Image: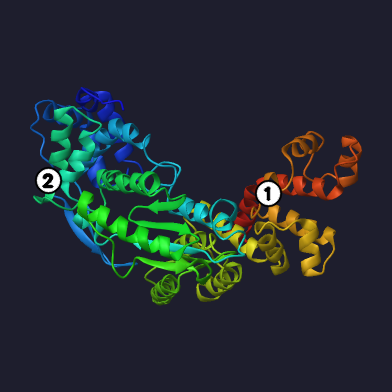
Amino acid sequence: MKNFYNIYREICSFNNLLIAWQNAKKGKTKRRYVKRFQRNLKTNLQRLQEELINQTYEPCSPKTFVLRDPKTRKISKSAFRDRVIHHALCNIIVHMFEKGFIYDSYANQIGKGGLKALERFERFDVFKRKVSKNNIREAYVLKADIKHYFEEIDHQTLIAIIKKKIKDDKVIWLIEQILAINNKTKGMPLGNLTSQFFANLYLNELDIFIKHKLRSKYYIRYVDDFVILHESKNQLEIWKNQINNFLKESLKIELHPSKSNVLRLNSGINFLGFRVFFYHKLIRKSNLKNFERKFNNLKILFDEGFIGREKALESLQGWLAYCSHANTYKYRKYLIKNFNTSFSHGNKLLVHNKKNYINYIKQVKESELQFSAQKTLFHYKRGLSIKDIAIKEGIKEATVWGHLANLIEHKQLSVWKILPHEKIHKIIRNIYSRKEQLRDVKKRINDSSITYDEIACVIASIKSKNKFKKNKKIFKKEIFN
């Protein structure tokens, strides 16, 4: 293992601090504290650099507030200058540790996240199908959660983990300064970049224990939530006790007694806000109720004139994007119609954010897609062939191909997942316009192995790329008419 000495000077370099400032201000350029820091940018960065070099840096006391949606959490908001330091530290040390993380650790890493973890858990061919032998035998899941995780992280244990890789005492000093912000020996504040990284690093020890000591094949972790799949319920119960003992002895934390259980896979697993079944997934009822309550509050505020339609639309779009990751086609269709009824804009429409409204128009168009096409999508994702779908639904194969083309045009399916890449490239080379006749393209290709249906799917993919332009025209029409 490579140990890293003398990296403190890289953290303190002006160029690194400048990059850290650019990262810290992303999405916050209009905030007053960012503008205030930017007015004397060079001076402020040089001051931070001097404090780091002289080791006189002391973090400011963070502002704390409580969020109660979806659950009560205490969030700490660090001063902007401290956030710059957090980014400066992470710019240098994160990649040193992430190389050693397991593939199925999905928290706080670029290109990963909760939805990627959910996608990994859902893939039949990798996890569920292998464990259950294609759903012909019983399979079980250890669904576990760590009790009061962020509040119980032990600082000395974390420092010991970091020292395995980093031997520069000044870097350790800086990390200790950041950890000691609340004058405690345990816990890290929610909301800081460093807290997210350290929390992931801390549980990397658990990842190594499960993968290399217990030799579990089917394991996924997102922050302090993790699942293990196995065909034996007894084996999972044994692992649960071993994991809890390891956490207590090595990391001074423990599993949540009521949230860590061995469950049957077919009964549905609550994981990252969704209830995941073998062939489909649904949104948790608690999340649906939370949004329904929020939606009703928005209606009241809209009727009283405190907010405009566009503000309500922002909330709806975020929820629709979240719902799209579950089997919620009918629900989303109902929700859009309900929104149009409850938040009627009359004859005049005042829109400030054009991009949001264009996306909303796109979702309205998608909601008009026939439900039979969604059935085809469901069967196709289960791994059924086009012939099998036609037999199951009692329709012609040509109808199934029509559904696939429709789904591709509405960006609910990728043509690259349906046809071989060689065929797609060959068809594209012979398409001169998205309004091409199928027979004209077929003549140019001169290949009997390529069918009219395959050509139609590729043309649908080309049309989907022009949706933005179409939506823009619809948007202008609604504004000015």
The residue carrying pointer 2 sits among few (fewer than 14), some (14 to 19) or many (20 or more) residues within 10 Å by Cα, namely some
The reply to whether residue 81 is in sight is no
Visible in this render: residue 431? yes
Q: Disc 1 on helix, strand or loop? A: helix
Instruction: Identify the image's colour scheme: rainbow, by chain, secondary structure or one colour.
Output: rainbow
Identify the residue at image location x=21%, y=60%: 65
- Percent from the top left, x then y, of residue 70? 34, 67
The x and y percentages for residue 188 are 20, 51
Q: Are marks 2 and 1 in contact (CB under 8 Å)?
A: no
For residue 391, what is the image quadrant?
bottom right
Q: Answer with the quarter of the image where residue 455 lies.
A: top right
Classify the position of the N terminus by image quarter.
top left
Q: Check disc 1: other Cα within 10 Å, few if <14, some if 14-19, many if 20+.
A: some
The mark that comes first in sequence, 2 or 1, is: 2
Count of marks, rendered view: 2
250 displayed left or right of 262: left
Where residue 182 appears, x then y in whole percent? Answer: 11, 51
Residue that numbered label 2 is attached to: 180
The span from disc 2 to disc 1 (Cα, nearest Å) is: 52 Å
351 to the left or right of 182: right
Above or below 148: residue 295: below
Residue type at mark 2 is Ala
Q: Which mark is residue 145?
A: none
Q: Which of 377 and 144 lies nearest the eye of the viewer?
A: 144
**Quadrant of the rendered image containing residue 481:** bottom right
- Look at 74% across and 41% down and name the residue there: 420
Q: Is residue 179 left or right of residue 468?
A: left
Q: Quickly name the residue at label 1.
A: 464
Seen from the viewer's position, the closer of residues 97 and 251 is 251
Q: Secondary structure at mark 2?
A: helix
**Residue at (61, 51) in percent of width and height:** 472
